[in-house]
Amino acid sequence: MHRITGKAGGDSLIEMSPTDSFNDEMNGYDQHASSSTGSFQEGPSPSPLTPDVCVETCESLNTSLASLSPSDYSDSPQTEPQTLERISALTGLSRKRALFLKFRSRIDKQQHSKDSVFFRDGVRMIDFVLSYVEDKDGERKQERRRLYEANLVNVGLELETEDKSESDDGKTYFVKIHAPWEVLATYADVLKVKVPFKTNDIPDDSEMPMNWLSTPFRLPEHIMHPQPDYFTAPFDKSKSDFFLIDNKDTFFSPSTRNRIVYYILSRCSYFRNECGDKDKKGIKRLLNNGTYSAAFPLHDSRYWTRSKDANCESDRYSLHKHWARFFCFFKEQPLNLIRKYYGEKIGIYFAWLGFYTEMLLFAAIVGTICFVYGILTYDDNEWSKEICSDEIGGNIVMCPLCDKKCGYWKLNTTCNSSWQSHMFDNVGTVFFAIFMGIWVTLFLEFWKRRQARLEYEWDLVDFEEEQQQLQLRPEYETKCTNRKLNRITQEMEPYLPVTSKCARTCLSGATVVLWISLIIACIIGVIAYRLAVYAAFASIMKDSATTNIQVVGPYITPQLATSVTASCINFVIIMILNLMYEKVAVWITDMEIPKTHLEYENKLTVKMFLFQFVNYYSSCFYVAFFKGKFVGYPGNYEYMFGSKLRNEECDPGGCLIELTTQLVIVMTGKQVWGNIQEALVPWLMNWWSSRKARNHPESLYSRWEQDHDLQGFGQLGLFDEYLEMVIQFGFITLFVASFPLAPLLALINNIIEVRVDAWKLTTQFRRPVAAKAHSIGAWQEILNGMAVLSVVTNAFIVAFTSDMIPRLVYMYAYQPEGEMNMKGYINNSLSVFNISAIPLDNKPDDGESPSWFNSSITTCRYRDYRYASGHEKEYSHTMQFWHILAAKLAFIIIVEHVVFVVKFFVAWMIPDIPSDVRARVKRERYLVQEYLHNYEVEKLKIQLIQNAQSDDCNCTPMIYPSIPKHEVLSECL
């Protein structure tokens, strides 16, 4: 055994060769508690070494050298404590230069740069890093660390510690972790990691005709396909020679290595065996109680330059160069390289986001065409011409829109609103609503095919959720003290009693209901604001005060001012509630103690989505389906909950334009705020760290310090990204009939989103722990549900929110001249009310009525289909109202059935798994069976030959050499 240890006062360096045995003493767990003289030792007998002292020619470093006594840069035992004291007294650049001189004098020719991702021996790769800072509670935390690290060694991991004196801040210790082959092989067997056993021999026939057209959008082949294509099988430690193992150090990818190490870290305990406190387990708990400040795998290089170590890959640099830059927005994504570096779970997310963005292109094109159609048919809008004309709209007196403070008004004052409404409320709206219902189906079905192809290419075909059921969450194992027999594995496993589970579920559900009720209360408050403020705006603007505002003045009406301000207030409330509820959702999910990681994610997904669904969409549902529907009529208005606030009427241009306003403000505001939050804030937070990394010499600013200064990806990092996109998906599907440009806005946002997320991952975040996932999980079912709901909501929007159906009924059934045009529609759609029936206390009391309001006006008009005063059915709904209602219901039924039939037909026509993928899967399964059979036959032959050649030997024949055994942290073995 060879061991080299350098100790000098408070700093220490521990090196272990790969062949070392492991125990607590060897790894120096007591190194931080005491101070000893420094020397270099090899084996049991110390032999002093005289390092070459470098001669520094840089003038600035000479200045720092002159500030120290000769003993300050000497490694002799007598001078080392004084050296540390002098360096600790320095600050800023002087301290950095002194450290540089000190460590230059100690590093021999064989020692690697601190920018390397290997141990100091240059052979063992750093798979994980733990960091900590000593504080007032140092003794307890030091004991936890000592026990925890000792247990890590017991399971076979190798550790190397960097002392705080070698860190840039002089406070942080770094524990580097390496998983040797024995540990990797053991846990690869436990986790059923798929590894190659044969080169893929199926020819790739996926070439598309006119493939040269896509050349500008492609990336280099070595970036798109960084690894050869193999047939794979789950790793079996007892059959290691069955697999294509060329180099054990690189056989498992870095993402697989850090996943295995994190699996061990999350299950390793930090208590003595005699103590028996099994609640003390896992790195997550140690991070929460401050024993360690961070735990993370290392990036393989700096993102702005390749690694100078020839044995180290530079995938991070390649990702930043070809993927994480905005000017690469038109290029394809290197999904295989993303998967190799970050793991399948993050790879699946970016694959879905990229596919969703590609499909948005078609929806954006059609939506833009429909919007342009509305503009081009601007002059054919007959009803808007009637509203704007002085002969028709100028002679129609409308009833007050609020009590007391609102006066009578002329219809032609809504001219601009009518023209704006036509851009979204036209025949193209119906076509686009039907198109989006079919587009959603095509998107989901084609994604299933794309996902199936990725499952095969990324070795996830046989990855089933049942495998994750064997991987219990460490929190579940520690908090569930009861045990029961598992009928499948026939082993005792922890479980949560039914009574406790029901109580936790009820409390969790009550909390969710409480927060949803809070959202509804906020929405009611915003509605009350709209009702109260509208009268104020009407009173302020009654004398056309806004006409003094240039450009936009003539377009500002009380209705528009109320709608815009209410939408902005609603958006602010949404953002505030989101920040508050996210922490609550995590807390109540932790309280439920889910059994597996899959169950945890599903529970959290449901809670967050239900809340976000109500939070973001409730205001849109109100405007679309409730506003203006329960108003009553003059003299008999409906009031909000019996108060003095009269229920809100639609804008004179229709409720659809208000829904458009609400959708634009909430959707656009969310996207802009999200991009600012995701891009600008992380950039500002990490600007100093990046600047420090670029300006530091590699020998001072190590790889683990660079990554330590970055942000952690966070528990909800990927979850938040999915949630953001699903909410956006709801905006462009549930209410797209009111705003055909919504897919275009989403497309622009997503083009930015892909590159912003890529930039954050490669430059601003520590490397996340790799995780497997064969699909987008519960989000797939949520998208399917929203796709079905979108057909219903868009049909109701066209029928009840827009004026499309009343116009068609008028043109085909009530046009007085029998012509197929809209002449006379405005007069037909307005009912007449006798002004003398208005209660005196509801008439304008401003003292200055408009000049056109005089005693000669005896009637006013309002939007409804009711009989006039004096009719035997006075103020009751006319027959035309019922015809229109029947037409609306018929339209909903017909459109829903047509779209659903097309959806199901398309889903039936498009198979979920491409035929070539199905063939490749069958081929791989056949080869696995064949090769395993041949392998077992050859193994049996070798055993028979060995038995025949060793008749005189009584020992058991061994095919594999004996290997040391370590404790395996797994409930399923």
Image (tube, rainbow, N blue to C red):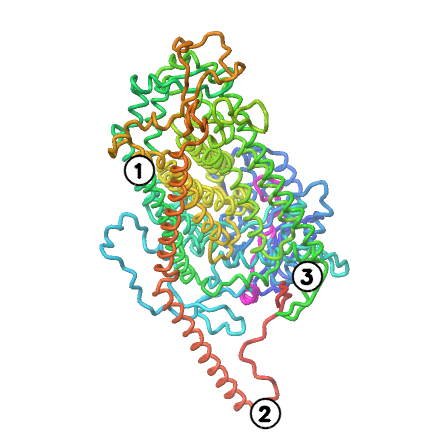
Q: Say if residue 9 shows up in the picture.
A: no
Residue that appears at 59% across and 46% down: 294
Q: Where, quadrant-wise, is the N terminus in this rendering?
A: bottom right
| Residue type for callout 1 | Val
What's the distance in space between the residues labelled 2 and 1, CA to CA? Answer: 95 Å
Q: Nearer the viewer, residue 806 or 717?
A: 806
Q: Say if residue 533 shows up in the picture.
A: yes
Which residue is disc 1 drawn over?
A: 427
N-term mark: 2 or 1: 1
Q: Nearer the viewer, residue 428 or 752?
A: 428
- Report x, y in % for residue 765: 50, 44
Residue 746's place in the image compared with 939, above or below, is above
N-term mark: 2 or 3: 3
Residue that appears at 61% across and 88% down: 954
| Residue type for callout 3 | Pro
Q: Nearer the viewer, residue 390 or 248?
A: 390
Magenta stretch: residue 37 in it? no
What's the distance in space between the residues labelled 3 and 1, CA to CA? Answer: 61 Å
N-term mark: 3 or 1: 1
- Report x, y in % for residue 529: 54, 25
| Residue type for callout 2 | Asp
Q: Residues within 10 Å of mark 2 (few under 14, many from 20)?
A: few
Residue that appears at 37% across and 36% down: 739
Residue 799's place in the image compared with 244, above or below, is above
Magenta stretch: residue 174 in it? yes
Highlighted magenta segment, given as a residue range: 161-190
Which residue is disc 3 drawn over?
A: 494
- Report x, y in % for residue 403: 51, 18
What's the distance in space between the residues labelled 2 and 3, CA to CA? Answer: 50 Å
Residue 807 position by quadrant? top left
